[in-house]
Amino acid sequence: MQQARNLEEVINRTLDLPVLPATTQRVLGMMADPDVSIEKIKKIISTDPGLTTKIMKVANSAFYGSYRNIQNPTQAILRLGLNSVRNIVVATSMKNVYKRFGLTEKLIWEQMIGAAVAASIIARDTRRSDPEDAFIGGLLHDVGKVVLNNEFPEKFALMMQSVYNEMVPYDVAEKEHFDFSQRDVGAYIVKKWGFPESLETLIRGFNGKETSSRDENIQNLVNTIALADIMCQKFGMGWRKPGGDEISYGGLPESLGLEKKGLEALDEKVRLAFAENADLY
């Protein structure tokens, strides 16, 4: 525990940590109240025309199974549910934490959104995790990359060249360039932003493969998001070229109860979701 606090002090001194937009902070604060009303959430969202437009767009998208046109924010919130609205608000605000938005930032952004979308689809199919928890976990598990790139763009670019061009594993390349991991940074950020401790635990212990977490829910979420990450690589979501059939899922499908036919169907669902919803956020 002391070691974690010391690391947080180093991160706090070293990095200029991003702050979420005011509207996002207010929505997250209200969502902490289990009895919050749709009307209160609608009033906050309606103060931000861009956010209102985004929520309407998502509510009317195929990704959320829309069969009729949503006409107003209240209908959109009712269709999506409060947890989905929270996730859309956070996803929409995430671009604001970037200090620049070139090719590197675009790749990170696409992978974050891709992991969120794929993880929610996997969770829905396997029923091992809540799809909305999987979405927010997929979206934020790599948020530390955004901060490292913001603060050390040249060093981060060199590291990513090793990952993309030389296929060096990310964690290996990261240790060669940084004194702390993007997981440590990401866990501290979501703590500062007021997300549940379970999300902090997930990010801090995330290792991109099956985890030995004692918490079954967190273990299932890690496995779900790890599989989503590999699907992003397979279909070129956040990667400059798809990995195709060369990509291996390892034992992740089995850990989530997926057999061959189920995995093939899931692959196709995720591929179509990427094609249809790449610009949804």
Image (cartoon, grey):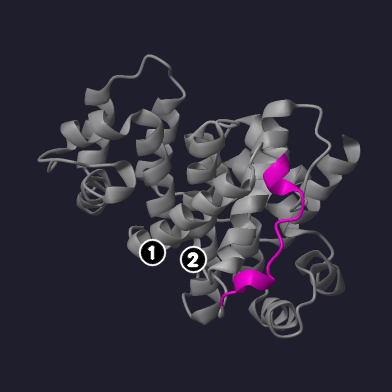
Q: CA distance from mark 1 to mark 2?
A: 8 Å
Graded by Cα atoms within 10 Å as few (under 14), some (14 to 19) or many (20 or more), the crowding at tag 2 reads many
Q: Is residue 269 visible?
A: yes
Q: In terms of image quadrants, where is residue 223?
A: top right
Q: Amino acid at mark 2?
A: Glu
* Depth order, front residue of 121/280: 121
Where 231 sits versus 1, above or below?
Answer: below
Quarter residue 281 falls in: bottom left
SS at circle 2: helix
Circle 1 — which element?
Answer: loop
Can you give x and y, in whole percent of width and height, for residue 237 in the image?
Answer: 51, 68
Please tell me which residue is depicted at 40% across the width and 60% down the height of the picture: 272
Q: Is residue 248 magenta?
A: yes
Q: Nearer the viewer, residue 156 or 113?
A: 113
Q: Residues within 10 Å of mark 1 (few under 14, many from 20)?
A: some
Residue 172 on image: x %, y %: 84, 69
* Count of numbered labels shown in the rendering: 2
What's the residue type where badge 1 is placed?
Answer: Ala
The residue under label 2 is 110
| Residue 89: percent from left, percent from top | 37, 45
Q: From what the image shows, is residue 225 above or below residue 29?
A: below
Q: Is disc 1 in contact with disc 2, using a CB cutoff of under 8 Å?
A: yes
**Label 1, on which residue?**
278
Q: Is residue 158 above or below residue 46?
A: below
Residues in magenta, as a range: 242-254
Q: Earlier in the sequence, mark 1 or mark 2?
A: 2
